[in-house]
Amino acid sequence: MDHKTIYNSVAFFCLVLYLLPLINARPETTAGYNFYDKSDGQLSYNFYDKSCPKLAMIVRLGVWAAFKNDSRIGASLLRLHFHDCFVDGCEGSVLLDDTKDMKGEKNAAPNRNSARGFEVIDRIKADVENSCPSTVSCVDILALAAREAVVMSGGPFWGVSLGRLDGVSASEKSANEQLPSPFEPLENITAKFASKGLDVKDMVALSGGHTLGFAQCFTFKNRLFNHKGTGKPDPSLDSSFLSNLQTICPDTDSSNTKLAPLDSLSINRFDNTYYKSLLNNTALLDSDQALLRDSKTAAMVKAYSADPFLFSTDFAASMIKLAKIGVITTGQPAAGAGGVGQIRKKCGSVN
Ligand code: HEM
Ligand SMILES: *[C@@H]1O[C@H](CO)[C@@H](O)[C@H](O)[C@H]1NC(C)=O
Ligand SMILES: *[C@@H]1O[C@H](CO)[C@@H](O)[C@H](O)[C@H]1NC(C)=O
Ligand SMILES: *[C@@H]1O[C@H](CO)[C@@H](O)[C@H](O)[C@H]1NC(C)=O
């Protein structure tokens, strides 16, 4: 057997083990399985154990079904969770459709024709409603789905604490202002993370989410033909990588919606090769390559590229922090979210 065969066999074996509990669906935190604390601030790991014991398995099965149909969906679900939490906190606002009185986040610049996975969350929510009506928030479902997506892509497992309520509003303006852009300098992105209580280490670790998924040409095209107004490509780009990208996104194609993988070394596998590509000057986004231009972040990039275990543990720890930003729980309304929360019946609209 060659290495690839062995790798694939081991990966398949792990996947079977992971999905095995589906045969006899049980809550995530039954005796012998809770290797983490039960409570986590206002949230807790066993929040729905009694009220919706099948929750974790319904989400896992839903993500698995979506995965079989669309290998990109893991990436899209991870990003959706990030975009939810980074804009006015984790309260499911990204899932809300626009109404005549409210311009929501779905059509904000970073999300329009870009954010994906809404139907998957809606479908899982419908299954959860069948099993336990008006019990589980959409924001909690999204947080669980993002974790499943990472695990199914070969990434780390982390305990998702639960008990968030869904917010009752969303803001296009907040999404445009708060989400990081691939065109802004590292200092600005650092400041946006800091404003959410996420430090530089969180920023570098979470950027490893770009080990999955794709970006459209318009998000990096300036690097290919007209870097900083020079009329020339970004001189730091690896030359064969550059010519590949110029083929995918020719100057003559004005649609700029073709896709290139964010981590071309392993497209749909969650691993640390994203950091290796930064070291090779083959990062897709300028905002990714920028992590290597600053000495503090560069040291972390090197550490993560050398040590996949370090990356996995740090990524998981930062995801736990991300999923706690601005949550609304019973008895403790969050600022900025209108001070109220609810369990939405449908994720696209408030009750
Ligand atoms: C650090 C600042 C970040 C910037 C500037 C940024 C920017 C982007 C851009 C421009 C895209 C491509 C969108 C498109 O072309 O439609 C993208 C995709 C993606 N981002 Fe980020 N991102 C950042 C942080 C993160 C974080 C923290 C995560 C998750 C932990 C993440 C996960 C993803 C994923 C998985 C995709 C691919 C989605 C798909 O294929 O559907 N990003 N990001
Ligand atoms: C399957 O994935 C495609 C995108 O690749 C999507 O358009 C379609 O809605 C998905 N179908 C189902 C049943 O999830
Ligand atoms: C970066 O942040 C500064 C200060 O907030 C702002 O003036 C500048 O426009 C930002 N740059 C970009 C490219 O967004
Ligand atoms: C980095 O680039 C070198 C030279 O282009 C290539 O041989 C090597 O495989 C690359 N490494 C990774 C991890 O992509």
Image (tube, helix red, strand yellow):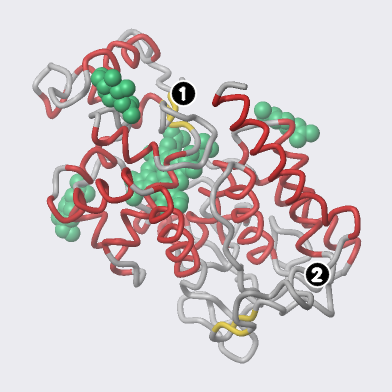
Q: Badge 1: few (under 14), some or many (20 or more) residues near its Cα, within 10 Å?
A: some
Spot occupied by residue 59 in the image (x, y as percentages of width and height) = 75, 55
Q: Is residue 113 visible?
A: no
Q: Taking 301 as reference, is 339 above or below it? A: below
Spot occupied by residue 71 in the image (x, y as percentages of width and height) = 64, 32
Q: Is residue 54 visible?
A: yes
Which of the 4 quarters of the picture holds residue 170? bottom right
Farthest residue in the bottom direction?
A: 331
> The disc labelled 2 sits on which kind of residue?
Pro
Spot occupied by residue 76 in the image (x, y as percentages of width and height) = 56, 42
Disc 1: residue Cβ within 8 A of ligand 1's nearest atom: yes
Residue wearing tag 2: 27
- Say which element carries label 2: loop
Residue wearing tag 1: 259
Judged left or right of residue 326, residue 203 is left
Quarter of the picture holding the C terminus:
bottom right
